[in-house]
Image (cartoon, helix red, strand yellow):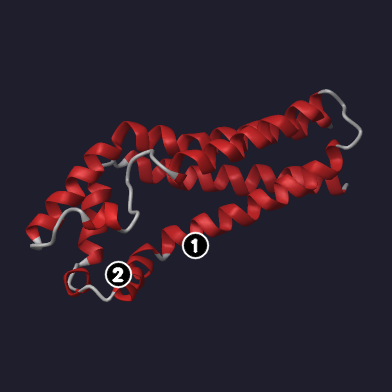
Amino acid sequence: MNAFIAAMQLSVAGAFVSIPVVRGRFGATATAAAHAELRRQGVRTTVLEENGMRFDAGGHETWAPVSIAAILAGTAALNLADAAWAGVLNRLVLGAVLAVNCVILWSNLTATTSVQAAFARKGDAELARVDVAALLKAAESGFPRWVWILQNARHVIVFGAAGVALTALAA
């Protein structure tokens, strides 16, 4: 049972690591496409950096998923070592991972409205006229089409493997 739980945790860890890998490989292209769209709209390209918007593997786009993957790898190692308190950690970590992935999914689904609201809160007239949907679509065009499939597969793996592991722990 512990080896099965560890395998589920490692698959979820791999899914989380895919985020900075893809952003590291294609993020500069996505950023360039976003800058081109901002120039087309007559908006300064620095608004991305000024507002903490990144399409590359910098900042929380790397440290958060890598940290989650490291924690999952650590709990997987505890499972493989048959540590007595691994069961409690499994439940806490896997539950937290499910919650975090819900936030990520929600963020993906509401990106346009979230960015529009963030720009509106700034009170900057130039930001207020940004066509956020076009900006995000341009950035998305900087990633290969298969990234959308990977993103959905990542969610299936995270929800599925973490859910199966939690179910197995409850049995």
**Label 1 CA crowd tier, 10 Å (few <14, some 14–19, many 20+):** few
Work out how far the residue at label 2 is from the one at label 1, CA to CA, in angstroms. 19 Å
| Among the 4 quarters of the image, the one containing residue 52 | bottom left
> Of the residues shown, which amino acid type is indicated by label 1?
Trp
Mark 1 lies on residue: 106
Q: Residues within 10 Å of mark 2 (few under 14, many from 20)?
A: many
The foreground one among 50 and 8 is 50
Left or right: 92 in relation to 123: right
| Amino acid type, residue under disc 2 in the picture | Phe
Give coordinates of residue 102: x percent, y percent. Answer: 57, 58
Is residue 48 something that shows in the picture? yes
**In what element is the residue under mark 2?**
helix
Vertical comparison of 131 with 74: above or below: below
The residue wearing badge 2 is 119
- Measuring from the top left, give residue 53's x and y in whole percent: 33, 53
Q: Residue at x 78, y 42 (%)?
A: 90
Q: Residue 140, percent across and down?
A: 27, 49
